Image (spheres, helix red, strand yellow):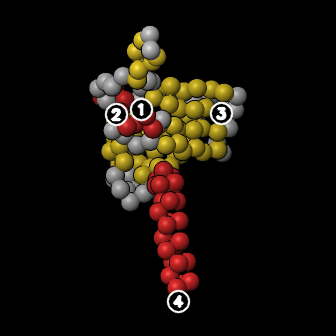
């Protein structure tokens, strides 16, 4: 019986340690192309809690067959290093998604030749701005 309790305790401990990794996967990225060749990116809250995501003022960094989408991050370069600045979130067009809701990225700049698209919000920037942080990606299989 003591051994069984020990295994149950280990199970709950492992679940608590793994849960943050599962929570970061609560945002899904979808890509679609319409008939005239326009590529659109969508974000879906696949979790159980509301998430605030940014949909504008994003950089689209093409690296070979991969496009990484990250927010513009203003910094102040001082003698002792760069300081990430907090500003108004409005230029980033924040959207709070309840579970199951989907939004779209403003002004997507994704070339059809890309094979993978990654939406990344750095943890330090998200903590400063009060948004979701993490990374979600999708391989392009456009019609």
Q: From this view, report whether residue 48 is shown above or below residue 121.
A: below
C-alpha distance separating marks 3 and 1? 22 Å
Residue occupying the point 52% across, 85% down: 2
Label 4 secondary element: loop
- Residue under label 2, please give it: 129
Q: Position of residue 138 (x, y in %)?
A: 60, 45
C-alpha distance separating marks 1 and 2? 6 Å
Q: From this view, report whether residue 50 is shown above or below residue 119.
A: below
- Residue under label 3, please give it: 66
Label 1 secondary element: helix
Q: Position of residue 139 (x, y in %)?
A: 64, 44
Residue 35 in sight from this viewpoint:
no
Given contact means CB atoms under 8 Å apart, are the residues at marks 1 and 4 in contact? no
- Residue under label 4, please give it: 1
- Residue under label 1, please give it: 125
Q: Of the residues under marks 1 and 4, which one precedes in the sequence?
A: 4
Residue occupying the point 54% across, 27% down: 60
Q: Residues within 10 Å of mark 2 (few under 14, many from 20)?
A: some
Name the mark nearer the viewer: 4 or 2. Answer: 4
């Amino acid at each position: 019986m003591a051994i069984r309790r020990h295994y149950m305790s280990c199970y709950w401990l492992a679940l608590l340690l793994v849960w943050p990794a599962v929570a970061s996967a609560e945002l899904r990225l979808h890509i679609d192309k319409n008939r005239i060749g326009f590529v659109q990116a969508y974000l879906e809250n696949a979790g159980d809690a509301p998430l605030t995501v940014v949909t504008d003022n994003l950089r689209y960094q093409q690296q070979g067959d991969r496009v990484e989408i990250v927010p513009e991050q203003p910094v102040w370069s001082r003698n002792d290093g760069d300081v990430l600045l907090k500003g108004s979130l409005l230029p980033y067009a924040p959207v709070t998604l309840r579970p199951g809701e989907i939004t779209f990225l403003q002004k997507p700049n994704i070339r059809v030749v890309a094979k993978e698209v990654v939406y990344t919000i750095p943890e330090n920037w998200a903590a400063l701005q009060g948004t979701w942080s993490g990374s979600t990606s999708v391989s392009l299989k456009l019609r």
